[in-house]
Amino acid sequence: MQDTVVIIPTYNEIENIEAIIRAVFSESNTIHILVVDDNSPDLTALKVKELQQEFSNRLFVEVRKEKAGLGTAYIHGFYWCLKKPYQYIFEMDADFSHNPKDLIKLYNACKKDGADMAIGSRYINNTVNVVNWDMKRLLMSYFASKYVKFITRMRIHDTTAGFVCYKRQVLEAIDLSKIKFIGYAFQIEMKFKTYLKNFKIIEVPVIFTDRSQGESKLSSGIISEAVFGVISMKLKSLFKNKKRVK
Ligand SMILES: Nc1nc2c(ncn2[C@@H]2O[C@H](COP(=O)(O)OP(=O)(O)O[C@H]3O[C@H](CO)[C@@H](O)[C@H](O)[C@@H]3O)[C@@H](O)[C@H]2O)c(=O)[nH]1
């Protein structure tokens, strides 16, 4: 996977970080990784710095002052990546819920099938490819995706997916300074902006397996940001369109 970087946001992922870095590198000799860590108290970033001695020139880490949300961690990572000549930029969780073996599928969707954005999708083809989530979390995620699809009218099944490959042009075309959401709703906003700009989006079926190590950082604040934010995001886009037509 040439010209490719995987951004991995981390907050307290000490149990996972070394294994996920090794697993990603074992999929390709050319791929790079950028970890964006929020000064994790469990010293995740220190572990990455140790591993940099083994993977010099391929493994990078940006450490922010404090926990500031998944969305802003990715934005920080995107700006960093756009300063380098990467053509394919991934989002991926640290906890193995996204299988590193699927990286190549998303890459090929962009490189060979012409996608500008490839989404590792759990809810495509009328199936639910999620392993080990309890029923409450599963229903919440599934219906969140349906809700977002209904409000935004995007033809995407897994609108909250966090396993994504972007072609560089997409991130260059979106005004990243205007991305509003700081939590997981960021995933919805990025897909919506990509969709509004008429980029080609392909969903690639993947199996999402809940983490076996560490804890999810999902909170009630993150959920309400998504529920109310999606409506305001859609209204703003309608208003903007109306102004353009006038
Ligand atoms: N730097 C940073 N990283 C964070 C933060 N919050 C979460 N992360 C990192 O972001 C990744 C995903 O966080 P989890 O907390 O493990 O997510 P999840 O509950 O399994 O949620 C999954 O489902 C969501 C809804 O479908 C997805 O939106 C999300 O990306 C993920 O795939 C992990 O690598 C975690 O360390 C933060 O504030 N800062």
Image: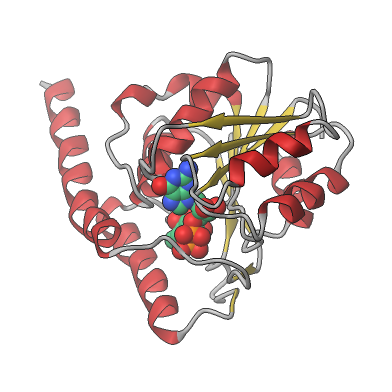
Towards the viewer: 137 or 148? 137
Residue that appears at 77% across and 32% down: 52
Indicate the quadrant containing the N terminus: top left, top right, bottom left or bottom right. top right
Residue that appears at 32% across and 53% down: 153
Q: Tell me, yes or no, if residue 212 can be seen here.
A: yes
Total marks placed: 0
Indicate the quadrant containing the C terminus: top left, top right, bottom left or bottom right. top left
Q: Which of the colour schemes (rainbow, by chain, secondary structure, one colour) is used?
A: secondary structure
Q: Is residue 242 above or below residue 7?
A: above
Residue that appears at 41% across and 32% down: 65
The image shows residue 34 at horizontal and vertical percentages of 64, 33
Towards the viewer: 215 or 76? 215
Towards the viewer: 30 or 16? 16
Towards the viewer: 149 or 15? 15
Q: Is residue 92 above or below residue 142?
A: above
Residue that appears at 17% across and 55% down: 228
Residue 245, by quadrant, is top left
